[in-house]
Amino acid sequence: VKSRVFVDAAGAMVDFSTTDRFYEDWVTKEIRRGEWRTPISGYTQIDGRKVAGVGHATWHTADRGEFTYVTIDSIGEGSARWNVAPGQ
């Protein structure tokens, strides 16, 4: 995957972009390449770790425009787990 990671002055990621993603046009059924971005506009602390707290994932397509399919709005304490063994 070829991508670009954008960071702020403090080195925190604020956006991720790649054009190595493909989608099927729902009208023509053609497979097309589109830009996929995951901007982050806020961070939170969970168990002493800095994690993305506010952001979204959006397709940017030439033929259909933008389509946001994931929105993250503040991940709360207790909603993330670390080093989870397979099957748990």
Image (cartoon, rainbow, N blue to C red):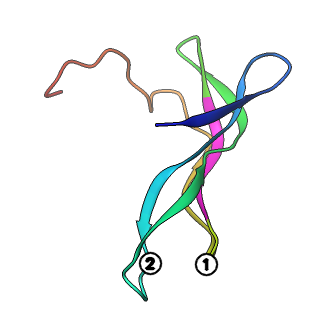
Question: Is 7 above or below relative to 59?
Answer: above
Based on the picture, tell me whether residue 54 belongs to the magenta stretch.
yes
Where residue 29 sits, quadrant-wise, is bottom left
- Which label sits on residue 47? none
> Looking at the image, do the residues carrying marks 1 and 2 touch, with CB atoms under 8 Å apart?
yes
Estimate the x, y position of residue 9 in percent, counting from the top left: 86, 20
What's the amino acid at mark 2? Asp
Looking at marks 1 and 2 on the same chain, the residue that comes earlier in the sequence is marked by 2
Question: Is 56 above or below relative to 27?
Answer: above
Part of the protein shown in magenta:
52-60
Identify the image quadrant of the C terminus: top left
Helix, strand or loop at label 1? It is: loop
Q: Is residue 21 left or right of residue 37?
A: left
Helix, strand or loop at label 2? It is: loop
Residue on which the image places disc 2? 25
Residue on which the image places disc 1? 63
